[in-house]
Amino acid sequence: MTRSYNGTYRTLLALAVNLDIRRRLEEGAVDAHAAAAMHAVRFAAAILHRGFRGGCPSGVRDPAVCGCVMGRG
């Protein structure tokens, strides 16, 4: 995976986290548009993730964040 994809992947993960925070409204409500956008971004990141072999992409150390299964790509 090229460096540009690494950067794009990290950007997508950061955006997904941001959308996850923003989708939560007061009193447990959820903004449906932000939730849908978050899932779309996570899907895009998952598609890019398939290009990484042997674990999380460089700069991403937490398997829970990058979506690795047990730390493997």
Image (cartoon, rainbow, N blue to C red):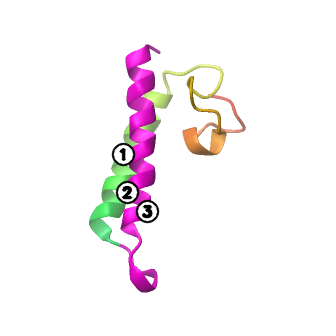
Figure quadrant of residue 58: top right
Q: Which residue is mark 2?
A: 19
Q: CA distance from mark 2 to mark 1?
A: 9 Å
Mark 3 vs mark 1: give the one in front: 3
Taking the magenta stretch, the answer to whether it contains residue 3 is yes
- Up-down relation of residue 41 to residue 48 (above or below): below
Main SS, magenta residues: helix
Mark 1 lies on residue: 41
Residue at (45, 33) in percent of width and height:
10
> Which residue is at the far left?
33
Alpha carbon separation for disc pair 2 and 3: 5 Å
Amino acid type, mark 3: Ile
Stretch of the chain drawn in magenta: 1-30
Q: Nearer the viewer, mark 2 or mark 1?
A: 2
Pick out the residue farthest to the top: 2
Lower sequence index among marks 2 and 1: 2
Above or below for 26 versus 31: below
Gap between marks 3 and 1 measured at Cα? 14 Å
**Mark 2 and mark 3 residues within 8 Å of each other at the beta carbon:** yes
* Residue 15 screen position, x and y as percent: 38, 46
In the picture, the disc for residue 21 is 3
Q: Are marks 3 and 1 in contact (CB under 8 Å)?
A: no
* Count of labels in the image: 3
Q: Position of residue 73 (x, y in %)?
A: 61, 28
Residue 17: say if magenta: yes
- Looking at the picture, which amino acid does disc 1 mark? Val
